[in-house]
Structures are given as structure tokens and as C-alpha cells.
């Protein structure tokens, strides 16, 4: 848990680690408004704060035009693609782990992000948006050599086997 003094220092630091800011917003909701106005607060974190933050944080973000609705509505769990749901479990278990980790995912996001974009874009904001809005493409983001270090670190903390395999292939 981030202690109070460290949280105060981080939210005031224009070079704060975005991962630390996310941790502060999650563990200390009273800092949500301060995290939201920090220049290192990435769009996905702003969306999360706009949806789950306290009233002061949501009001602060609304003043800047950031609301959960502006980012496509509330965060919802993604449904598994119908193709994967129809595949028998025994058949899925027989696939080699390395092969499954690098299969191109089926893009199911409503924003039009593709696996090709996730693998090749150099635009850091677009990389952040894809990671936030298209969870099915996170393994591709992990393989993109242009993905920034803080996002790589965050992806590694998710515990997803496909993402972990993609991160291991970077080295």
C-alpha cells in the first residue's frame, strides 16, 4: 500500500510513474482528482477514475471533458469470441502453449482497433488506448517494440499467460 506522504509527493510530481498513479487512485480514492490532473495520468486511468472514482474526481474529470460515457460507456467484461466458445476444451488443451500465445487474436472491441495496429503503431497514445479499450489485443501490444516501459510493466502484472509469453519474446 502506498503511504500517505508518498502518495502526496507522487500526485504532485509531473514525472510520476503512471503505474504508481494507478495504484494510488485504486488504494486511495480521495486522491483520485489529484491523480486525474497529473500530466502522467494516461487515458485508461482517467476512464477508470471517471467511472469508479469518488464524486470530486468525477467532477474534476468532467470539467476536462472526461466521463465514462465519453470513452464508450462503463467498463464491461469482454465476451469470449464465439469461435473460441465453440471449440471443445479438450481440443484447446492440445494446442501447444507457444503456438496459442502468438495466434493473432480476434479483435472484438467496438473501436475498430486491429491486431495489426497493436503490433505496429508507434503512436504512444494509440498504444495506451488499445491497451485500455481492447483487452483482447494486449498480447499484441506486449510484442510491439514501440510500447512504452510503464505499459510493459503494467502488462506484466496482469498475469495473463499470452501476455507473459509475448513479453518473454521481447528479450
Image: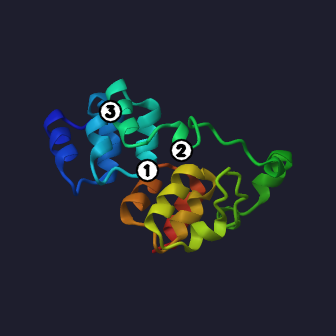
> Counting residues from the N terminus, which is met first, the one under dot 1 or under dot 2?
1
**Element assignment for label 2:** helix
Which circle, 1 or 3, is nearer the viewer?
Answer: 1
Quadrant housing the N terminus: top left
Marks 1 and 2 sit apart, C-alpha to C-alpha, by 9 Å
Labels 1 & 2 near each other (Cβ < 8 A): yes
Marks 1 and 3 sit apart, C-alpha to C-alpha, by 19 Å
Residue at image location 29% in from the left, 39% down from the top: 24
The residue wearing badge 2 is: 71
Q: Is residue 15 left or right of residue 57?
A: left
**Element assignment for label 3:** helix
The residue wearing badge 1 is: 43
Marks 3 and 2 sit apart, C-alpha to C-alpha, by 23 Å
Residue 143 is situated, as x and y percent measured from the top left of the image, at: 54, 69
The residue wearing badge 3 is: 27
Q: Is residue 27 left or right of residue 169?
A: left
> Counting residues from the N terminus, which is met first, the one under dot 3 or under dot 2?
3
Residue at image location 42% in from the left, 53% down from the top: 154
> Counting residues from the N terminus, which is met first, the one under dot 1 or under dot 3?
3
Q: Residues within 10 Å of mark 3 (few under 14, many from 20)?
A: some
Residue 65 is situated, as x and y percent measured from the top left of the image, at: 42, 42
Amino acid at each position: 500500500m502506498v503511504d500517505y506522504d508518498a502518495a502526496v509527493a507522487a500526485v504532485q510530481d509531473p514525472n510520476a510513474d503512471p503505474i504508481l498513479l494507478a495504484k494510488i487512485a485504486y488504494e486511495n480514492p480521495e486522491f483520485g482528482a489529484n491523480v486525474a490532473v497529473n500530466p502522467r495520468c494516461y487515458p485508461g486511468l482517467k476512464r477508470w477514475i471517471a467511472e469508479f472514482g469518488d464524486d470530486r474526481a468525477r467532477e474534476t474529470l468532467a470539467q476536462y471533458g472526461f466521463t465514462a460515457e465519453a470513452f464508450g460507456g462503463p467498463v464491461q467484461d469482454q465476451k469470449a469470441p464465439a469461435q473460441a466458445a465453440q471449440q471443445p476444451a479438450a481440443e484447446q488443451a492440445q494446442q501447444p502453449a507457444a503456438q496459442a500465445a502468438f495466434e493473432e487474436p480476434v479483435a472484438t472491441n467496438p473501436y475498430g482497433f486491429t491486431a495489426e495496429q497493436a503490433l505496429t503503431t508507434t503512436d504512444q497514445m494509440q498504444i495506451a488506448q488499445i491497451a485500455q479499450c481492447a483487452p483482447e489485443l494486449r498480447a499484441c501490444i506486449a510484442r510491439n517494440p514501440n510500447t512504452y516501459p510503464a505499459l510493459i510493466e503494467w502488462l506484466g502484472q496482469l498475469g495473463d499467460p499470452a501476455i507473459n509469453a509475448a513479453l518473454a519474446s521481447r528479450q
